[in-house]
Amino acid sequence: MIRKSHPVGNPAVRSRTVGPFSREIWVARLGLVPYDHAFELQKRLERARWAGELPDLLLLLEHPPVYTRGRRTTEDELPMGEQWYRMQGIEIADSDRGGRVTYHGPGQLVGYPIVSLRPYRDDVHDYVRRMEEVIVRSLAAAGVEAGPAEGLTGVWTPARRKIASIGVHVNRGVTTHGFAINVNNDLQPFEWIVPCGIDHCQMTSVTRELRRSQDMSSFTDLVCAEFGGVYERRPVAVAPEQLAPLEAVST
């Protein structure tokens, strides 16, 4: 059963008013980035955020084919064995995010917010509910009905097909990792694992639901706009090269 998501402003989503802070959030569109490179980038930017060397930041990108294992992943979630997956051209990487195993690949939009939770009263649950709302609103704007499902993580269609995953990590009040929305990506690799640790989990994408290919740039625009609205921020586009000096400072 799809759990109805609440509009921003409803206490179920925003139980407390966001306090005074910089309303700007930098948004960097990075294109196709290997998972291990993105992981290290998050760690460097996380350290810079702790030190106050940069504002809150949202990374938007895609990954080459990779299975990522969360902190609760078990061996049976990769039943074919690591060597078999690598023979299919899919890497396997460990992650410090929450959740279980999942797949990332080209055509899937991945979002990594690196933000301080202080403006949100350090309420992780509120932060995740807002993330769900960003995804639900973005999908609705694209023409896909979806929402959270009782007892399950991520965002699902009414036909009980999972279209987006969420897995976050919080360290010293700063978030890393985030969400992945299936837009145009190949869904076959999900069938070779136990996605998110859910047996018989059926995955879907925006393309599959609407039966037409999607423009990734336009969909990313939707996500940027909804992220700003739901988290009460003003997205400011920054070029990937603008992060390079910050990376150097934080290492």
Image: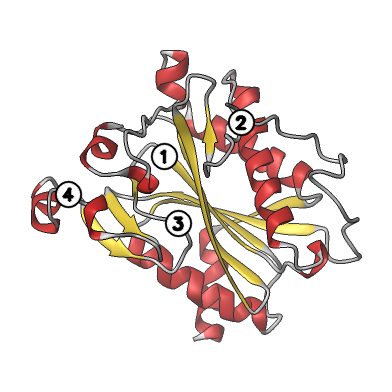
Which disc is residue 99 wearing? Answer: 3
- Disc 3 crowd, CA 10 A, few/some/many (<14, 14-19, 20+): many
Q: Which of marks 2 and 3 is nearer the N terminus?
A: 3
Check the image and report above or below for 201 versus 19: above
x 38%, y 36%: residue: 107
Q: Distance between the residues labelled 4 and 3?
A: 18 Å
* Mark whose residue sits in front, 4 or 2: 4
Q: How far apart are marks 1 and 3 (CA)?
A: 18 Å
Query: Is label 4 in contact with label 2 (beta carbons under 8 Å)?
Result: no
**Dot 4 amino acid type:** Pro
**Dot 1 amino acid type:** Gln
Query: Looking at this view, is 26 or 102 the one in front?
Result: 102
Left or right, residue 57 beside residue 86: right
Q: In which quarter of the image is residue 245?
A: bottom right
**Dot 3 amino acid type:** Gly
* Mark whose residue sits in front, 1 or 2: 2
Residue 12 screen position, x and y as percent: 81, 43
Label 4 element class: loop
Which disc is residue 108 wearing? Answer: 1
Residue 22 screen position, x and y as percent: 83, 64
Residue beneath disc 4: 79
Residue beneath disc 2: 147
